[in-house]
Image (spheres, helix red, strand yellow):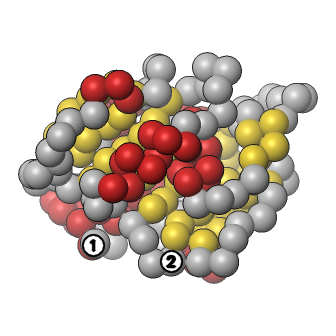
């Protein structure tokens, strides 16, 4: 699917974004200007999510790696759920993955390598270069979870095979090329329309 076709698909989309302290809200609005994004904090979850196509849990790292209770509550809504940045850890913890902290964070750009399961999500982005700034790593996934991309640090993107749960370690600003970020995020949000 081309970016133009995706843009039309996304034009009617309403997303609830859970801000985990400094979520990349402005970056997402620039990358996906036709998506309506309502931003709330984790302590202000609504009783009703009717009218939303999906939930994004996002943020940068503020000392806590993940919030498993938050993930459990979000899953109960029954909407597609996407975790980015610190939301990656939130989703991974919900899926039962072990997270290990990186004490020596890398600098510069690293290569993100899509798996066979991730080729559609990362189509047209080879080579895909991202900032080396992950704080928590996943080395293996449980049964029922697909690895969508890896780097030399570990697993960078995952999706549950049966449930609408997807997670990506990279925030929009982590991509070396804005065009790559735009395509990957359009593909990610496009998943909300297919479930």
Asked if one can make out residue 14 in the rendered structure from this viewpoint, the answer is no
Q: Residue 112 in the image: x percent, y percent?
A: 70, 55
Locate the C terminus and report the quarter of the image it occupies.
bottom left
Secondary-structure class at tag 2: loop
> Which residue corresponds to the image point at 61% horizontal and 44% vertical from the top-left?
89
Per the image, the residue denoted by label 2 is: 161
Report the residue marked by disc 1.
194
The image quadrant of residue 95 is bottom right
Q: Earlier in the sequence, mark 1 or mark 2?
A: 2
- How far across and how far down the image is residue 172, in percent? 49, 38
Q: Position of residue 25 (x, y in %)?
A: 36, 28
What distance separates the C-alpha of mark 1 from that of mark 2?
14 Å
- Is residue 70 shown above or below 116? above
Task: Name the residue rendered at 61%, 53% in the picture.
Answer: 92
Q: Residue at x 47, y 20 (%)?
A: 21
Measured as percent of width and height from the top left, residue 190 is found at 31, 62
Relative side of 168 to 186, left or right = right
Image height check: is 97 above or below 58?
Answer: below
**Quadrant for the N terminus in the image:** bottom left
């Amino acid at each position: 699917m081309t970016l133009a076709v995706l843009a039309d698909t996304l034009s009617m989309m309403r997303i609830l974004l859970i801000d985990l302290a400094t979520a990349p809200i402005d970056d997402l609005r620039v990358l996906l200007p036709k998506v309506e994004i309502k931003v709330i904090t984790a302590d202000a979850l609504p009783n009703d999510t009717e009218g939303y196509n999906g939930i994004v849990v996002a943020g940068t790292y503020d000392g806590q790696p993940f919030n498993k209770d938050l993930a459990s509550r979000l899953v109960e809504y029954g909407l597609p759920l996407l975790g980015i940045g610190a939301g990656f850890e939130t989703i991974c913890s919900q899926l039962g993955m072990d997270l290990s902290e990186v004490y020596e964070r890398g600098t510069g750009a690293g290569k993100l390598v899509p798996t066979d399961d991730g080729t559609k999500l990362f189509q047209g982005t080879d080579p895909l270069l991202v900032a080396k700034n992950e704080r928590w790593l996943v080395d293996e996934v449980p049964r029922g979870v697909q690895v969508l991309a890896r780097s030399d640090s570990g697993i960078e993107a995952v999706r549950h095979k049966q449930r609408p749960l997807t997670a990506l370690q990279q925030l929009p600003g982590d991509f070396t090329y804005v065009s790559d970020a735009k395509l990957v995020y359009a593909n990610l949000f496009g998943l909300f329309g297919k479930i």
